[in-house]
Amino acid sequence: MKRSRIPLLAVFPVTVITSVIVAPLALGNHPVRWTSGSAMPHVVMGGAHTGPKATADAPGSDAKPPAGAGTGTQPPPAPPVTVAHPWKPGMPQWGVQIYWEDNPRQSDTEIREKAHLQARYLIGLKANSVSISFPFYTGTVTSTKTTAGPGTPSPERLETVIKVFQDAGLRTTVRPLMDEKSLGGYPNWRGTIKPSDRDAWFASYRTFLGPYLDVAEKHKVASFTLATELNSLEGDPHWKALADTARKRYSGEIGYDANYDNYVAGRVTMPVEQLGVDAYFPVKAPDTAPVDTLVKGWNDWLDKKSRGPLSGIVISEAGIGAMAGAYEKPGDFHVTGPLNTQVQANWYRAVCRVVKERKMKGVYWWSIYFDDNPFAKPAENASRLHFSGRPDTEKAIQDCFGSDYALPGSTSAP
């Protein structure tokens, strides 16, 4: 969606925008970024998504794994595995977001072993793609600087993980994600930053991205996400210069991931080849609702933007808690309601159907924390957003990723 500015339909009338944006905020359906995600139905744990996904820190990439996350015994070593049907142009991206807050105390050998573990799990899900989300940092909402921080992997350590995933045959995306812990909490999140000097902010961000673009080019990574959910900066003329600079260092696909509120409400104009949507659409439905009802709820949201196929879009994040009452706040990563794995599994089935019926380019589920053991059963106090170790949801993902599906006009078969 970045290349020459992706045409994303005209801006809605004021009345529609009001109902899409203001109403969700009033009802608590806005992306809920909590200290780990966006404040919209995008809840991040720990510090990743903390923006407008809901009303606090949404479940997202900035967050650290909550206490009690899956940390069971790692399965015994297994022979190397590779994707049965590696991704090729024209095939959907069936993927997972891996959120990695680097721990410098871990050796390169340890992170390589963890990456192997994650790759084996993804291949078991029949995934063909993976996105490596990792944090970078800023100060307050008016800060003019972006920097690496305690959880940011070095370019060299990122190389180690990229190589493991690529050796396993996974299509790989590199995705820096602004950590929100310094922004002061709701209503502040990455989508509301207001740099006091935009020239300085973009110059700082360009400097930060440079070494990671070089690594992505060195390993011929499929995609590089230039930014994620920066609502307040979308359309800024500085992006073109930044994207042009990025293309001088990196020859792959450059993307931008929009938060679902901005995507639905208006025109997202970013100079990129690929537009992703972090999609946490609230759907008013009882826990017993059939998949058809959830599909309709998603389509009602998407139809506000455009009816029919959305062949230029990839769902860059989708997920929901395995708990009662989650359909109306799918991005709420902080609430721990009564466990209901069927709610989560049905949501995943519904999203998969929408992706296929609307002929989208694929979906990435949010998320797995890099340090977690995905083969372990989640602890009772683990985030309900975890899908790894939940058999009902894992089966839904396998059914989705294992089905035959090719993009319109493609000659590639899965």
Image (cartoon, rainbow, N blue to C red):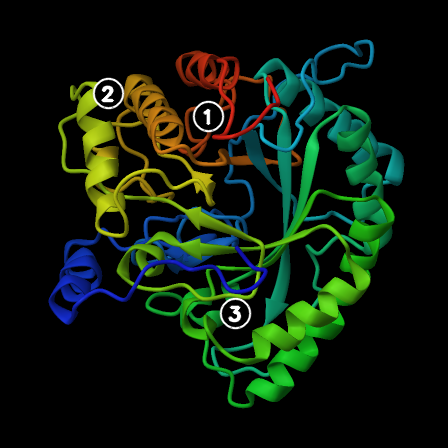
Return the x and y of residue 355 as percentages of the image width and height: 39, 31
Amino acid at dot 3: Ser
Return the x and y of residue 42 as percentages of the image width and height: 38, 49
Amino acid at dot 2: Val
Left of 223 or right of it: where is 324? Answer: left
Measured in 3D between alpha carbons, the distance from the residue under mark 2 to the one under mark 3, in whole angstroms, is 39 Å
Measured in 3D between alpha carbons, the distance from the residue under mark 1 to the one under mark 2, in whole angstroms, is 18 Å
Image: 90 above or below 235: above
Amino acid at dot 1: Phe
Q: Is residue 146 visible?
A: no
Q: Tag 1, which secondary structure?
A: loop
- What residue does disc 1 label? 387
Q: Tag 3, which secondary structure?
A: helix
Q: Is residue 7 visible?
A: yes
Q: Residue at x 55, y 40 (%)?
A: 65
Of callouts 1 and 2, which one flags the residue occurring earlier in the amino acid sequence? 2
Of callouts 2 and 3, which one flags the residue occurring earlier in the amino acid sequence? 3
- What residue does disc 3 label? 182
Return the x and y of residue 221 as percentages of the image width and height: 75, 44
